[in-house]
């Protein structure tokens, strides 16, 4: 299992200075995160940024993809967790709303 950090600019140590971040995989785009997912499968934990650069898919796009993937083929770990570290309050709330709602109904 691995932990994924999605952010186009920041590094995990800047966002989580008190955590050990050496084993995290940093992805700068949704495309990069999907490549990692394809290679390694489901992460146990994701830290989402929402805005990933102009005209780029967002952290919300990745969250939607993860939910749809789990609905279609399953595989999301039972203990999957996430955090949203985005500075965009509306985008962050949307990611939390989607994932919290899905995880609640998924049981």
Image: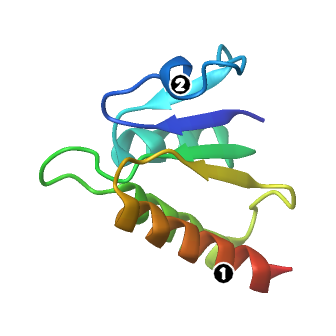
Q: Label 1 to label 2, Cα distance in Å?
A: 26 Å
Snapshot quadrant of residue 62: bottom left
Left or right of residue 20, residue 4 in this image: left
Q: Position of residue 68 (x, y in %)?
A: 55, 75
Left or right of residue 77, residue 91 in this image: left
In this rendered view, identify the residue nearer to me: 41 or 92: 92
Eyeballing the image, is 104 above or below 87?
A: below
Element at label 2 = helix
Dividing the image into 4 quarters, which one contains the N terminus? top right
Disc number placed over residue 66 in the picture, else none: none
Graded by Cα atoms within 10 Å as few (under 14), some (14 to 19) or many (20 or more), the crowding at tag 1 reads few
Instruction: Return the disc, 1 or 2, that comes first in the chain's sequence.
Output: 2
Q: Position of residue 96 (x, y in %)?
A: 56, 67
Eyeballing the image, is 29 above or below 77?
A: above
Element at label 1 = helix
Residue projecting furthest to the top:
22
What residue is shown at x 86% (from left), y 80% (from top)? Answer: 107
Graded by Cα atoms within 10 Å as few (under 14), some (14 to 19) or many (20 or more), the crowding at tag 2 reads many
Snapshot quadrant of residue 89: bottom left
The reply to whether residue 65 is in sight is no
Residue to which mark 2 is pinned: 12
In this rendered view, identify the residue nearer to me: 21 or 36: 21
């Amino acid at each position: 299992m691995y932990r994924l950090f999605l952010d186009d600019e920041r590094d995990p140590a800047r966002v989580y200075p008190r955590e050990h971040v050496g084993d995290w995989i940093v992805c700068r785009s949704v495309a990069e995160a999907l490549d990692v997912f394809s290679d390694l499968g489901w992460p146990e934990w994701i830290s989402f940024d929402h805005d990933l650069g102009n005209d780029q898919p967002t952290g919300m796009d990745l969250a939607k993809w993860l939910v749809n993937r789990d609905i279609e083929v399953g595989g999301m770990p039972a203990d999957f967790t996430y955090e949203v570290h985005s500075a965009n309050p509306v985008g962050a709330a949307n990611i939390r709303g989607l994932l919290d709602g899905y995880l609640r109904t998924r049981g």
